Amino acid sequence: MSVTAQRTSPDTMIIGISPTSLALPAFTDPSISQNITVSNTGNAPLIVSSVSSTNTMFAASPGSFTIPAGGQQVVSVTLTPTSYNFNLQSTTLTFNSNQTSGTNTIAVTGQRTAVRTLQLSASSLVYDYTGQQQSVTVTNASTSNDYLNISGISPTSTSDWSASITTANLVPGQSTTLTITRLTNPNPVTQNFTVTSNKISGNDVVQASANTRIIGLSSVSFPSFTAATASQTMTVSNTGNNTLSVTNITSTNSRFTISPTSFTVAPGGNQVVTVTYIPTDFSSQSTTINVTSNATGGTTSVNTSAQRTQLIQLSVSSTSLVVKPWDATPSAYLTNTGSR
């Protein structure tokens, strides 16, 4: 009788984790995931029954699995911070198993970056007249990330503009209102307003611009004249930044007429109009010339006067007389060639 015996080596389940520690990259989304590898360099199956974490914001998936001898298992590590939590987070993940040796823990860190995105419904406003008021919606355009604190507006007022904003601590998607009012014809015609906040990204400047059409009228002066009519010119200017449209020019005295009575004047340009006085007598006449337009400021009327001078002019039919003895009554003729 023969007996054969063989000594067998004991079962080994040697766990390993790669990398040995994990630093998650910065992120702005609600969560971030990254893979690690759990290996078994033993000679028997490694059974992982659960994965525990010292920080509940971290999780590992799958949470249980079996790795054959010499095998590996990819595990996804996920960090999901609580709402509006941007602190550095850390944990120790422990892979609870039947291991006989090896390291079954890994240190993991991660931090979500705050995103506070300020969004304006309009970045520029154009104003056509003084007293005009316009509003801009200011929104926290972040996606479930962080509060946007709106603390004010700068400047709140100038000699030409005023601005106000409803301060608020905006959750993502929430809005508040900025209001800007044009007070005068500004010079310069633009003004920037900055929303004061803790924003990280996004445009926070609103530019207010005024469409100005500043009309100017030159004086009109008639010298003395004796003709049937007299004409002088008047210059209509536009020192604004927008086209001036003149729709009518009238006179309070019908003896004064103006031409042309409608036209447009480009910014920085001018238009010459003719004022004609047609007298019916020799009295002094005055008038007010009124210009109707879309001007936002400036002079819209000018006063003038005119008077035709009376002219008495004699014409002699002969400048000399020869008197002969036999002419009893020599004569010459006087003619009034004047205006009276």
Image (cartoon, grey):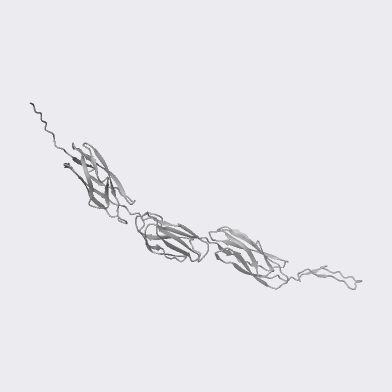
Q: Where is residue 317 in the image (x, y as percent from the top left)?
A: 83, 67
Residue lying farthest to the front in this orientation? 1
Residue closest to the eye, 300 or 220: 300
- Examine the image and state in which quarter residue 83 appears: bottom left
Residue lying farthest to the left in this orientation? 1
Residue closest to the eye, 317 or 125: 125
Q: Position of residue 47 (x, y in %)?
A: 21, 42
Residue lying farthest to the top in this orientation? 1
Relative to 104, say whether 262 is above or below: below
Q: Which residue is drawn at 40% across and 63% down?
A: 153
Q: In this view, does 158 lie to the left or right of 32?
A: right
Q: Is residue 97 left or right of residue 204?
A: left
Q: Position of residue 336 (x, y in %)?
A: 79, 70
Q: Where is residue 73 in the image (x, y as percent from the top left)?
A: 25, 40
Quadrant for the N terminus in the image: top left
Residue closest to the eye, 146 or 295: 146
Relative to 278, say whether 118 is above or below: above
Quadrant for the C terminus in the image: bottom right
Query: In this view of the protein, can residue 77 be seen by the observer?
Result: yes
Residue closest to the eye, 31 or 138: 31
Query: In this view of the protein, can residue 150 be seen by the observer?
Result: no
How many discs mark residues in the rendered view? Answer: 0
Q: Residue at x 62, y 67 (%)?
A: 290
Relative to 340, say whether 27 is above or below: above
